Amino acid sequence: MKTHIYCFPLLVALLCSCANGGSPGHRLVTPEVNYEFSGGAGHYNYAPSIIQDKYGIRYGFICENRDPFKIVDYVYLYKGIPTKEGYKWQPGTQILAPSDTGWDNCHICDPDVREFKTTYKGEQYNWIMTYLGVDRWDCNHNQIGLAISKNIEGPYIKFDKNPLVSYSDTTRWGVGQSTTIVKDSTTIWLFYHSTTQGDRFCMREIKLNDLDNIVLGEEKAIPFLSSNSYPAFSEENIYVVSETRQSKYNDIPTWVGDVCRLAYKPITESLFTEEDGWIEIGHVGPEESGFPRNHNPGILTDTKGYMITDDELVMYFTPAMTGENWLWSYDLYSATFNLKSYFQ
């Protein structure tokens, strides 16, 4: 999930401490890494939210700049069609832009889309998008907004009482990099990065089926995971991918990690335990991707944020080179982990 281009604080301390190198008797899984798509010359792609519908079509909601070589974040949709040769991605389409004024008038990014019915101004909508908005060019004061649509491909309408999760301090990073999982017909779980008390990975339970009567749960920190993490649940396990820093380095971009790690714990265990129960399955680092930076991981899920199968996990992430062209190397890649063989 989603390091803002200039808006993420330096990852000086590694917060992710996924337990050990795989569970007893299990070797770490080496994933199959593949290039997926790019916005083209002068464009960057990162912060993927990729969901798959019942027909096997994949919808990739990502952060991309609209104008070549101009650093302003928009939300784009890439549609992936399954073929015998693999997924073929259609050209990206802009679906959400920064506002002219207000809380999200500089950048909007880190989209996360889910199938969820909600009522707004007397009409029913079927899809929700949470996203990060910011109104300062120093990229502090990030907040989380909401957009809704009747169709997965849009158009998406911004909620008129945004931000959904606000942040008052203009001198700190704020809240953002959100991921949602649909709990039931009335409620979502919202996971996100927060600097309310240091850099933390947090969760809120939010009643969201009626936008005139939203109930925000309290912010709860999830220990032992880095602030830039992305969870997905299955019937058996909780999976999470996290951006981490495994090596010391000084070359730009210094603010993004070099290793994206995949870990799990059984679904019967709590997210909020005081003991680190996360078990590493595998990772994508420079050796696996061929790039010195690997960041902003997300997990392919169904339309409500759940694992499609426990047999494999597809992580989408953004690699990067170092040096002056670091930003223009931001393309989207995938890493497929064979879970079936891991759990045998």
Image: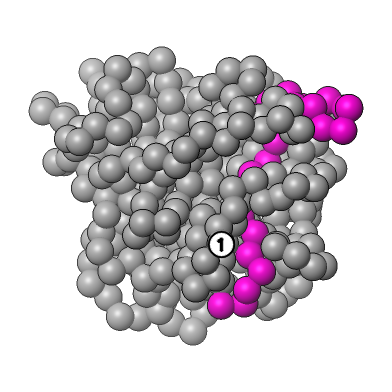
Look at the image and give the residue range highlighted in magenta: 115-138
- Packing grade of label 1 (10 A; few <14, some 14-19, many >=20) is few
Verify whether residue 134 appears in magenta.
yes
Residue wearing tag 1: 168
- Please indicate whether residue 159 sits to the left or right of residue 88 in the image: right
Report the colour scheme.
one colour
Q: Where in the figure is residue 328, as x and y percent of width and height?
A: 57, 73
Q: Is residue 288 above or below residue 324?
A: above
Q: Using residue 208 as the reference point, say whether residue 270 is left or right of it.
A: left
Identify the image quadrant of the C terminus.
Answer: top left
Q: Looking at this rendering, what residue extends furthest in the bottom direction?
A: 324
**327 inside magenta stretch:** no
Which residue sits at x=49%, y=73%? 171
Report x, y in % for residue 111: 63, 48
Element assignment for label 1: loop
Q: Nearer the viewer, residue 273 or 296?
A: 273
Question: Residue 69 falls in which quadrant of the image?
Answer: bottom right
Residue 188, above or below 184? below
At horizontal 64% and vertical 21% (from top left) the residue drawn is 186
Q: Amino acid at mark 1?
A: Ser
